[in-house]
Image: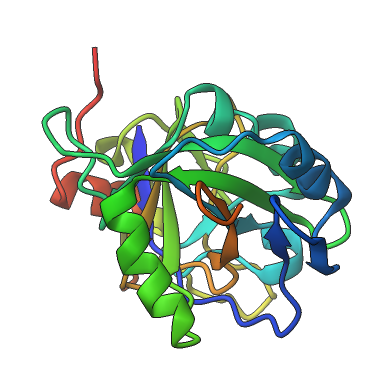
């Protein structure tokens, strides 16, 4: 199964601003593993590096608007696949084999204080100019992820589905419905997750996800479910 989750802007008044070539840490707001990585980063000429808040724990921030639920333990266990796959930086999930990518995730960590996955993404020169222009105006682009996984599990009946054709009635017709007893219809994503896409997007799903800031460059260092969205956008497994 492939899932596509778009996400909204994350508004955080205290973000990380790093200049690797001059004064070092300007404003402390990053998880220590992020700053430790950045101290060792050797920027490539023509590339910009951005700090991305990729995905928050559903136990803290709630499920995505697509009805997907990612637990804290799931994020801890599989976040490194953003780095090891590695996840590429696309625009609007245009991630087919012939689609151009505009960068790549070079570092991933789980922030236990904020209960979220944070990335450092290396962006190419042309795209970095677009992003930098937006950020200079105080606009921090929204981000999103897509992942592969063997199945998801219904929060109501426990059905495990490898494709949408195997979905139970809850995930097919009641995604995000809140029952009178407090149960909510969501798809639990919890096994062998492989993130392969971190995209610059417009449509919202996870309200905690966006680019936080530039950290370095070569010069100055019925709800639609995510599986259904992936089908509509014609995602395919790469063999």
> x, y (%) of residue 99?
15, 38
Let me know if residue 165 appears in the view.
yes
> x, y (%) of residue 154?
52, 48
Q: Which part of the image, by quadrant, shows the C terminus?
A: top left
Q: Left or right: where does residue 17 sit relative to residue 238?
A: right
Residue at the far top: name it: 239
Q: Tell me the residue at 61%/82% (across/down).
A: 11
Q: In the depicted view, which residue is nearer to us: 116 or 34?
A: 34
> x, y (%) of residue 185?
52, 63
Q: Which part of the image, by quadrant, shows the N terminus?
A: top left
**How has the structure been colored for display?**
rainbow
> x, y (%) of residue 102?
30, 44
* Image: 86 above or below 212: above
Q: Quadrant of residue 223?
A: bottom left
Q: Left or right: where does residue 229 sit relative to residue 87?
A: left
Q: Tell me the residue at 50%/46% (across/down).
A: 218
Let me know if residue 224 appears in the view.
no
Q: Quadrant of residue 189?
A: top right
Q: In the depicted view, which residue is nearer to us: 193 or 121?
A: 121
* Image: 239 above or below 215: above
* Image: 162 above or below 131: above
Q: Left or right: where does residue 103 sit relative to residue 68?
A: left
Q: In the depicted view, which residue is nearer to us: 31 or 22?
A: 22
For the image shown, how many numbered marks are present on the structure?
A: 0
Q: In the depicted view, which residue is nearer to us: 94 or 120?
A: 120
């Amino acid at each position: 199964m492939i899932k596509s989750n778009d996400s909204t802007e994350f508004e955080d008044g205290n973000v990380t601003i790093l200049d690797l070539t001059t004064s070092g840490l300007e404003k402390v707001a990053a998880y220590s593993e992020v700053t430790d990585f950045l101290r060792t980063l050797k920027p490539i000429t023509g590339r910009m590096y951005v700090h991305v808040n990729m995905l928050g724990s559903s136990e803290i921030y709630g499920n995505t608007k697509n009805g997907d639920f990612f637990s804290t333990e799931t994020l801890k266990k599989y976040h490194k696949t953003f780095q090891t796959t590695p996840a590429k930086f696309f625009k609007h999930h245009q991630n087919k084999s012939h689609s151009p990518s505009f960068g790549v995730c070079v570092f991933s960590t789980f922030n236990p204080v904020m209960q979220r996955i944070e990335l450092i993404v290396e962006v190419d020169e042309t795209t970095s100019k677009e992003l930098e222009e937006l950020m200079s105006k105080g606009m921090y682009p929204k981000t999103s992820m897509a992942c592969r996984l063997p199945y998801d599990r219904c929060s109501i009946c426990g059905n495990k589905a490898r494709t949408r054709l195997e979905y139970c009635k809850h995930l097919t017709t009641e995604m995000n419905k809140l029952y009178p007893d407090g149960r909510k219809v969501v798809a639990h994503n919890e096994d062998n997750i492989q993130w392969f896409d971190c995209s610059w997007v417009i449509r919202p799903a996870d309200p905690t996800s966006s680019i936080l800031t530039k950290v370095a460059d070569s010069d100055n260092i019925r709800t639609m479910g995510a599986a259904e969205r992936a089908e509509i956008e014609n995602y395919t497994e790469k063999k």
